[in-house]
Image (cartoon, helix red, strand yellow):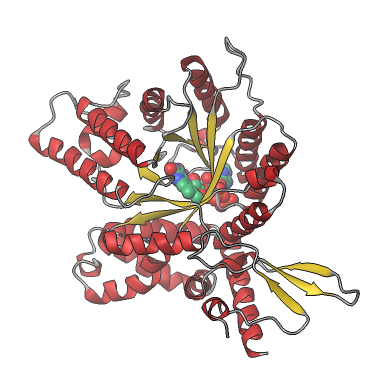
């Protein structure tokens, strides 16, 4: 067996079937082909596509299969009960820091599925595995945050921080820089402003036009270092009582740092908010008037359970429609931004979603426009680690096929695909792991579809090996 077949657990082709290795991105990397050429009775080549998950390494496939099976069967209830206990900060006995059995149960399951690692060595290895699968890059965030309760809080003054509060900001900056240094050119660093602690939260709640000076200086240092290593930054969206201020702070950062025709900083827009389309329009106008590049990471929104319901679209279908319409309007450049120069502002769009229909619509529209030489915007795609691997793999297959094309425009439209990772110790990540588990539970149909696709792919590999 040739090593490439061995490593991918794909049997060498039978007589009459020729495996075509469509891509080698770099000489040191090997990639499974996504198509097989059958020589049919008339001697012609007929291409048969392999399923998207054919691109997934077998170890990750088995782990994802075990996980999604748990999340879509009767084992779900006890698993979620266990996660809820572990994520409860008062349940000392279940803390992964104190209880080695809990740690032992979490590490190979939830942690391995959703987390990048505990330290530089583990995280770098995970990133390498991801990029070796053909992903364009990663988005990395550090899980440890200084958590300050925001609901019902009356903000205190922020102009005279205590030594401890300044220490919190310094710690947040150092953790963020440490995370940034694990990334390569083209990757993203994920930042939450509120992770900087009490001062950030209270300034945000008070609606201050700019972040407190110590946070502003820290952000500038992070932006400058990101620029010099060619990485980018995205600012996560949070709850609606914080978001208008976070938007203002992000706009100020973009105004100062997205100057050279490229977006160093991306802000997040939550399409589940009824105001999302208006927000995009006002940010486009600000970019147009200020002549800077707008970076938009578009998500549906993760805080539906904690938000005033009236601010969120009444139905899931309306959120879907809002999301898809924002994507298509940006890709077609047809938001009504008729400012002084009448030229659509420079925009870089990141489509962050697990929804296969949104992803397919975005990819298809963007490819058509590039091929037809119609105006559009720069676009990238991403899913969270351990989630929607079938969607990510489908994009990877388009990427490989497009890059293989002899047509230059098709090569240009090849999707850039990212995985979004969090790193930190098991106890630092426990809340994050719980949120991911809940999200999988909420998206029951998607989890079941993914389990089915993974089972199908495993059977395909086993069958090919044994026949
Ligand atoms: C790479 C990445 C980064 C992310 N970063 C952020 C972030 O910074 N901030 C943030 O808030 N979220 C973030 N998310 C999470 C995201 O907002 C969604 O919660 C999650 O991805 C599920 O949405 P989906 O697009 O994958 O599609 P789906 O799974 O099809 O949609 C589920 C979403 O639809 C919406 N929805 C569900 N039911 C209803 C209803 N009855 N009425 C109205 N709307 C409904 C909710 O937003 C829900 O999360 C991120 C997601 C990804 C993939």
Q: Tell which of 408 and 201 is nearer to you.
A: 408
Q: Is residue 307 visible?
A: yes
Could you tell me if residue 302 is visible in this image? no
Residue 98 sits in quarter? bottom left
Closest to the observer, 24 or 196 = 24
Residue ID at (32%, 24%): 207
* The C terminus, quarter of image: bottom right
Q: Report the label total.
A: 0
Residue 456, compared with residue 191, is above or below; it is below
Left or right: 128 with respect to 154?
A: right
In this view, which residue lies farthest toward the left?
Answer: 163
Image location (x, y in percent) of residue 241:
38, 32
Task: Kindly give the residue lying farthest to the top in the view shown.
Answer: 340
Q: Position of residue 51 (x, y in %)?
A: 67, 67
State whether residue 153 is above or below residue 334.
Answer: below
Q: Position of residue 455 (x, y in %)?
A: 60, 75
Is 396 on the left or on the right of 114, as rendered? right
Locate the N terminus and report the quarter of the image it occupies.
Answer: bottom right
Give residue 292's position: percent from left, percent from top: 46, 22
**Residue extending farthest bottom:** 466
Q: Is residue 104 above or below residue 127?
A: below
* Residue pictured at 28% horizontal, 42% vertical: 195
Identify the residue at the far right of this view.
42
């Amino acid at each position: 067996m040739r090593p490439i077949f061995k490593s991918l657990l794909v049997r060498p082709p039978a007589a009459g079937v020729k495996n075509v290795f469509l891509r080698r991105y770099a000489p040191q990397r090997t990639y499974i082909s996504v198509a097989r050429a059958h020589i049919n009775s008339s001697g012609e080549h007929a291409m048969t596509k392999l399923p998207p998950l054919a691109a997934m390494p077998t170890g990750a496939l088995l782990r994802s299969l075990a996980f999604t099976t748990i999340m879509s069967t009767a084992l779900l209830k006890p698993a979620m009960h266990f996660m809820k206990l572990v994520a409860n900060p008062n349940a000392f006995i279940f803390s992964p820091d104190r209880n080695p059995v809990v740690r032992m149960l979490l590490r190979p399951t939830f942690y391995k599925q959703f987390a990048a690692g505990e330290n530089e060595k583990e995280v770098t290895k995970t990133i390498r595995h991801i990029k070796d699968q053909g992903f364009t890059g990663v988005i990395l965030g550090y899980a440890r945050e200084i958590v300050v309760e925001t609901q019902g809080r009356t903000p205190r003054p922020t102009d005279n921080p205590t030594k401890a509060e300044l220490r919190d900001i310094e710690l947040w900056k150092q953790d963020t820089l440490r995370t940034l240094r694990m990334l390569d050119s083209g990757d993203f660093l994920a930042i939450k402003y509120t992770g900087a602690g009490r001062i950030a939260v209270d300034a945000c709640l008070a609606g201050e036009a700019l972040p407190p000076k110590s946070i502003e200086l820290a952000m500038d240092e992070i932006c400058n270092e990101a620029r010099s290593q060619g990485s980018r930054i995205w600012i996560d969206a949070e709850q609606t009582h914080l978001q208008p201020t976070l938007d203002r702070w992000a706009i100020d950062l973009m105004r100062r740092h997205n100057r050279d025709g490229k977006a160093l900083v991306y802000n997040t827009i939550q399409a589940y908010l009824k105001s999302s389309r208006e927000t995009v329009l006002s940010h486009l106008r600000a970019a147009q008037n200020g002549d800077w590049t707008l970076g938009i990471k578009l998500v549906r929104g993760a805080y539906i359970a904690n938000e005033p319901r009236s601010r969120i679209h009444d139905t899931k279908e309306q959120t879907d429609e809002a999301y898809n319409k924002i994507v298509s309007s940006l890709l077609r450049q047809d938001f009504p931004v008729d400012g002084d120069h009448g030229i659509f502002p420079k925009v870089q769009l990141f489509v962050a979603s697990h929804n296969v229909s949104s992803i397919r619509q975005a990819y298809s529209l963007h490819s058509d426009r590039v091929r037809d030489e119609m105006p559009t915007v720069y676009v990238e795609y991403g899913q969270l680690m351990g989630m929607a691997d079938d969607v990510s793999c489908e994009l990877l297959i388009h990427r490989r096929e497009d890059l293989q094309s002899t047509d230059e425009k098709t090569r240009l439209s090849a999707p850039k695909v990212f995985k979004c990772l969090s790193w930190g110790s098991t106890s630092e990540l426990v809340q994050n792991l719980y949120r991911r588990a809940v999200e999988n539970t909420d998206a029951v149909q998607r989890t079941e579809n993914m389990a089915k696709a993974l089972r199908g792919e495993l059977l395909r590999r086993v069958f090919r090996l044994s026949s």
